[in-house]
Amino acid sequence: MDLNLSILVGKDKGKSFKLKPDKEYIVGRHSKNEIKIKDENISRKHFKIQVKANRYFITDLYSKNGTFVGGKDLIPGVETEVGEGVPIIIGMTILGLGSISDSSLKQFLDSAGFDSEMSDKEEAIEQKRIIAIKKNMEFIYYVNNSIMDSKDKEEILEILLDSIFNLFKRIDRCVIISVDNKTGEINNIIYRSRKPISDPEKIYNRELVEQALIMNKPVMIKDSNNVEDEDERITESLQLMKIRSALCVPITSYHGVRGAIYVDSLERPSGFRVSDVALLKNISGRAALAMDSISSQMS
């Protein structure tokens, strides 16, 4: 087993530090630390890491900006076990543990909003992006923990609905659509809207949802007024409904399509990004697994 701490995002991206069992390592920006990280946003002595019986343990050393692990900041002075595949954020640096950290965390980081290289010339932008990544990670961990404690599928879908609607402040409506995985027919719809709805039948764009369900992959329309770059049939239906941008992500399990997540913005063009697609794909996959687990328990 390779024991190491790697920089996944930061000024020394790709650099790895080997860790010896039972030895304590101080991580921070101080030059005399066993592991020095080039990041002005972290403390001189930020956290301590030690490997015991091939398990990683981290203790935040009362750092100024905290050590973010598993969707939350560690309690200063309290030793916490951290597994491989769990990102560690300090300042503007993201770290990973073990030999598989880079490959295993890439998809997770993409879903949390990390999709470009660090840039020293745009430090303010990078700081905002790290904050957004932490917020999205909190969201992923919260949704995952909540749905894993759910006892029925309806509760899972309600959690998805409320969580997405609260996270995406720029959306006007969020709809969770349930599909019978045997017949493929829509059997239930729940939604949230920032404005009163006069006709619940028009709470989502059917053409966009049907396309996502048929193709079993996300469909995003950035701007319904820009028909050159989008599906003309869908953009025309969006225009009729006065929807400027929309996104639909299927909820797919091993047993088939279980439903879809639909969000839209009535007036905002380019209301959604590629990172939004990755984030919703991440949590839709977790929801599908939780629904499969409930089905297995009932059968």
Image (cartoon, helix red, strand yellow):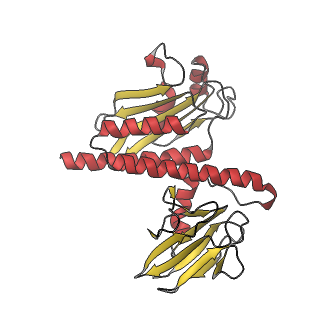
In the figure, 288 relative to 176: above or below? below
Please name whichever residue, 125 or 28, is drawn nearer the observer in this view of the structure: 28
The quarter of the displayed image where residue 184 is located:
top left
The x and y percentages for residue 78 are: 47, 68
Please name whichever residue, 239 or 35, is drawn nearer the observer in this view of the structure: 35
In the figure, 30 relative to 208: above or below? below
Q: Quadrant of the N terminus?
A: bottom left
In the figure, 218 relative to 204: above or below? below
Residue occupying image coordinates x 38% and y 35%: 158
* Number of numbered tags placed on the structure image: 0
Q: Can residue 19 be seen at all in this image of the molecule?
A: no
Query: Which residue is the extreme one toward the right?
Result: 121
In the figure, 244 relative to 212: above or below? above
2 relative position to 152: left or right: right
The x and y percentages for residue 39 are: 71, 67
Residue occupying image coordinates x 41% and y 42%: 251
The x and y percentages for residue 222 are: 64, 34
Query: Which residue is the extreme one toward the left?
Result: 299
The x and y percentages for residue 14 are: 65, 73
The quarter of the displayed image where residue 269 is located:
top right
Q: Can residue 145 be seen at all in this image of the molecule?
A: yes
